[in-house]
Amino acid sequence: MKCCVGLLIVMIAFVAAATAAEKKKETKEWKVPARAARRENPVASDEKSIAAGKKLYAQECADCHGGSGRGDGAGARDLELDAPMPDLSDPRMWKQSDGSLFFKITKGREPMPGAEELSEEQRWHVVNYVRTLAPKPRGGGGDGDDAQAAKGK
């Protein structure tokens, strides 16, 4: 009888550990408030803005997100993430509005710190630079939930 109880306890512990590990792998969707997603980018995405954004990205973001935005920066290796590091070079990035990217850069989410110490203009420069990391999908992209919110739909 003691053997059966012990075996049962081991099995319950194993199932609990497996369930916890599986939950950790689930990607948590990063919901952006609709008002923030609709926010329009007031900074023209020109060479000057992109160059400024690239410099800021190198200082503030590249350690984890990597130079090309693939999430392969040296700092990312030390993080215990509950989901893969976002690939900023993925064309699906275009499904997010500029306002959504601005919100995420501004507020951050564990383990990513917010960038509120940067001016609003600087954060918009980072948005403009991050846009250069991912090729636009065919058909222009931007048909995701955040893009729809940005269009007011």
Image: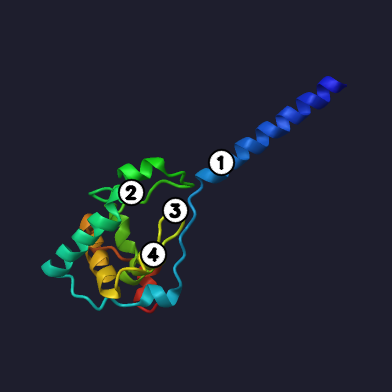
Q: Quadrant of the N terminus?
A: top right
Residue 22: numbered disc: 1
Q: Residue at x 18, y 70 (%)?
A: 45
From mark 1 to mark 4, how far is it between C-alphas?
Answer: 26 Å
Q: Secondary structure at mark 1?
A: helix
Q: Which residue is under mark 2?
A: 64
- Does label 3 or label 4 sit earlier along the sequence? 4
Q: Which residue is under mark 3?
A: 111
From mark 4 to mark 2, how far is it between C-alphas?
Answer: 15 Å
Residue 27 spot, x, y in % from top left: 48, 50
Q: Secondary structure at mark 2?
A: helix
Q: Residue furthest front?
A: 117
* Residue 40 visible somewhere in the drawing: yes
Q: Residue at x 22, y 59 (%)?
A: 136
Q: Quadrant of the C terminus?
A: bottom left
Of the pair 115 and 72, the residue shown nearer to us: 115
Q: Looking at the picture, which amino acid does disc 4 mark?
A: Lys
Q: Secondary structure at mark 4?
A: helix
Q: Which residue is under mark 4?
A: 104
Q: Looking at the picture, which amino acid does disc 1 mark?
A: Glu
- Count neighbours of disc 1 (C-alpha within 10 A) and say few if under 14, some if 14 to 19, many if 20 or more: few
Q: Is residue 31 left or right of residue 116?
A: right
CB within 8 Å, label 3 to label 4: no
Q: Looking at the picture, which amino acid does disc 2 mark?
A: Cys
- Does label 1 or label 2 sit earlier along the sequence? 1
